[in-house]
Amino acid sequence: MNKIYYFDHAATTAVNEEVLKTMLPYFSYSFGNPSSAYTIGRRNKMAIDLARQRIAKVINAQPKEIYFTSCGSESDNLAIKGVTYANTRRKKHIITTKIEHHAVLNTCKTLEEEGIEITYLNVDKEGKISLEELENAISDDTILISIMTANNEIGTIEPIKKIGNIARTHKVLFHTDAVQAIGNIEIDVEEMNIDLLSMSAHKFYGPKGVGALYVKNGIEFKQIQDGGHQEKGKRAGTENVAGIVGMGKAIEIAYKNIKEHNKKLIELREYCIEKLQSKIQNMKINGSMTDRLPGNINISFPGEDSTELLLKLDERGICTSAGSACNTGQATPSHVLMAIGLNNEQAEGTLRITLGRENTKEEIDYLIDSIVEII
């Protein structure tokens, strides 16, 4: 098989070998249902509890505040719908942004159809919200503010601590979709006044099909999936033990080495941008260059077709994307790029490069040479 040059870590990451090794027993001899009373069931319950402790430690939460789900999208749904359904007798208003992941936007769209008022905040050309606009949008009817920590397309990091302070001052709950942020930046839910937080294991070298939702102790939210009483009665369904164990190990590894990991990614990112700028004159970098995920590069090449560019890069063994992997196949331009003020031509010629732990300068040189030759 020819070498694969992988530059799409915002879409997914390869499972860490140590994580895989930790997971393997739970596919075979350690197969017990964690709700069972006998020994192999109780052992698996203990393995889940250890993973819960590892995740809680990383974000400065309590283990009992961590609920396991199937992915980031389910975590977003559970957070937003669960809190809303628990409060609709008193309040009927949610605040979010125009650049959220569709797991949030489509959840809000569903709630709008059920009579909930949604305010969609604008962002500036870097993808940042206005704190003044946020505060002005809050009313006595506001249940929840849901704003992502870092954007999955342009990499911009929002002022989460300031948003949390505003929410706490007005006694409004604050949820953040931190799917792209966990594993890349340090988050303290207590210091940042975060009430609910979504994450997904496959973004930080864990397995696909498992996520988690942090819910601050004392917050009421309703189970939205009918079934058993797993996850303290908040999320029904037999637990994905192997996935949960893998998620706990992956997050522990990610934060053990986060400073070195980020330093490497920032160096590679700057190297890539500088070399591209020296070879292609009219390219445009999208998103903030000061508050940005370490490995994110989002570039517009006016006059180019990103779909054609992606296909030609793929022929050379290069994996990149035009935006969120969840939106692949859509004919319309990215809602994120349109929200930051790009025109159709700029949006349709946009490439997202997201770096990871295995990337090297030699690989980036190959990527840049390929882009230049194709263009």
Image (cartoon, grey):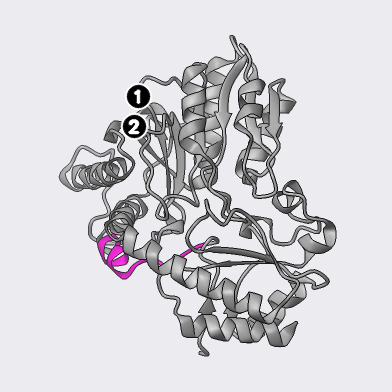
Locate residue 135: give its quadrant. Answer: top right
Report if residue 13 lies within the magenta region.
Answer: yes
Residue 174, percent from left and from top:
50, 28
Mark 1 neighbour density, 10 Å: few (under 14) some (14–19) many (20 or more)? few
Dividing the image into 4 quarters, which one contains the C terminus? Answer: bottom right
The residue that mark 2 highlights is 65
The span picked out in magenta is: 12-23
Report the residue at 30% width, 53% height from top: 245
Image side of residue 40 versus residue 74, left or right: left
In the image, what residue type sits under mark 1?
Answer: Asn
Observer-nearest of 250 and 125? 125
Residue at 51 percent of width and 75 percent of height = 271
Quadrant of the image occupied by residue 27: bottom left
- Look at label 2 and name its amino acid: Glu
Residue 349 image offset from top left, x and y in percent: 76, 67
Seen at 72% across and 27% down, the residue is 112
Q: Check if mark 1's residue and mark 2's residue have beta carbons within 8 Å.
A: yes
**In the displayed structure, would residue 166 be above or below residue 362?**
above
The answer to whether 165 appears left or right of 155 in the picture is left
